[in-house]
Image: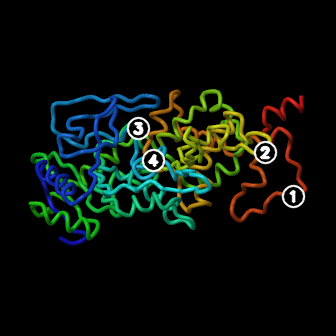
Amino acid sequence: MRIGDAAVIDPRGLDALIRILGALGYDTMGPVVQDGAIKPGPVAGVVDLPVGYRDEQAPGHYRLTKGDDQSVFSWAVGPGSWKAELFPPTQELWRATVEGDEVTFVQPEPPTAPIAVIGARPCALASLDVLDRVMRNNEVADPRYAARRDGAFVVVAECGVPAATCFCTSMRTGPGVEKGFDLALSEIEKGGQHFVVRVGSERGAEVLSLLATASATNEDLEDRRTVLAAAVESMQRHLDTEGLPGLLARNLEHPRWDEVAERCLACGNCTLVCPTCFCSTVWDSTDLDGSIARGRSWASCFELAHSYLYSGPVRVSRRSLYRQWMSHKLSTWWDQFGTSGCVGCGRCITWCPVGIDITQEAAAIRASDGAGRQGGPALFEAGAAPPSSSEEVPPEDVEMSPSERSADA
């Protein structure tokens, strides 16, 4: 087997693949049904995967149904992403103990086994690429993330049944995938359930060579293309990305932000389910025995503490909180990391309690581009002259903390 080769396996072959990865020392993880949703979890074989399950998604709506068929990947995405396996929601960074005049620092031991992800969607692979830019390939890498990511073996499951909230075609992150994986699976029902397996790395070739496989025929490859074409055709949501970063940058005072603020609860659900949000906070705790622990937990730009400066939070209104999240995701992320922060998975739409749809919000701003006051000095389009430093910012453009508002009153 070589990179670029394709083979065919049946469900027993998929089961053998999982078991072989476990025997090679990998911590095998995959999609599992838990708490009424499909989430990442430990898997030892096909029996642990969501066989026969389908998801029903809409803005603010998610339901799982169980059919009688044996399809393994007839669902889109659940609330949990693979980010949590590489960048845990809460983790201890170090612990210190004090004995007399001596202070001893100890870091927790890293996981002993590398992770093997079975069934990651193409949009999930794209989200890992985004996180890599932030946490592994940036000037200062996160050693915990990098170590876990470098050892990961990724088996992608291409998507044949996108949810009603998916828009991966707009972000060019699915439903198929061509690179970045070790092995890629395409589930085919025509002619009996089987999987077309493509090799994406030398590690993938080595693992696949341990399986009993059949050569993929031209018909098998055509069946794969047919499945993906049907998925593209069934995509219900789209996001026009043409000039989107500049569009949002010049519409910071668009009245649409006020409209969305009337619905937004500032709950932060969108940031919790997003597979690329990486904000975190660092905290210290002291035990009664005198030991000290420093840890890190996920944070959200919807928290007031996220923009806290010396006198209080800079962003205090739901308008400014949602605007920060959406404009960072679709606009200023390009300035920082050379890519969009959105992969089109649709989780933020499904898991928003009030069903706010990021694709609709972007479309509404595009439809009335320029409404309201223009963007401030910090954000202007490439090639355009920045506003003069002598221009005064209207007082209503500055968001004050509660204490400042009280003093001003």
What is the crowding at mark 1: few (fewer than 14 residues within 10 Å), some, or many (at least 20)?
few
| Residue on which the image places disc 3 | 79
Q: Residue at x 31, y 57 (%)?
A: 113
Q: Mark 3 or mark 4, which is nearer the start of the sequence?
A: 3
What is the crowding at mark 2: few (fewer than 14 residues within 10 Å), some, or many (at least 20)?
few
Q: Mark 3 or mark 2, which is nearer the start of the sequence?
A: 3
User: Could you tell me which quadrant the C terminus lies in?
Assistant: top right
What is the crowding at mark 3: few (fewer than 14 residues within 10 Å), some, or many (at least 20)?
many
**Label 4, label 2: how far apart the Cα atoms are:** 29 Å
Identify the element where label 4 is drawn: loop
Identify the element where label 2 is drawn: loop
**Residue type (three-letter) at the residue carrying disc 3:** Pro
**Residue type (three-letter) at the residue carrying disc 4:** Pro
| Residue on which the image places disc 4 | 88
Mark nearest the camera among 1 and 2 is 2
User: Could you tell me which quadrant the N terminus lies in?
Assistant: bottom left
Q: Determine if residue 362 is in view.
A: no
Q: Residue at x 70, y 36 (%)?
A: 255
**Label 2, label 3: how far apart the Cα atoms are:** 35 Å
**Label 1, label 2: how far apart the Cα atoms are:** 24 Å
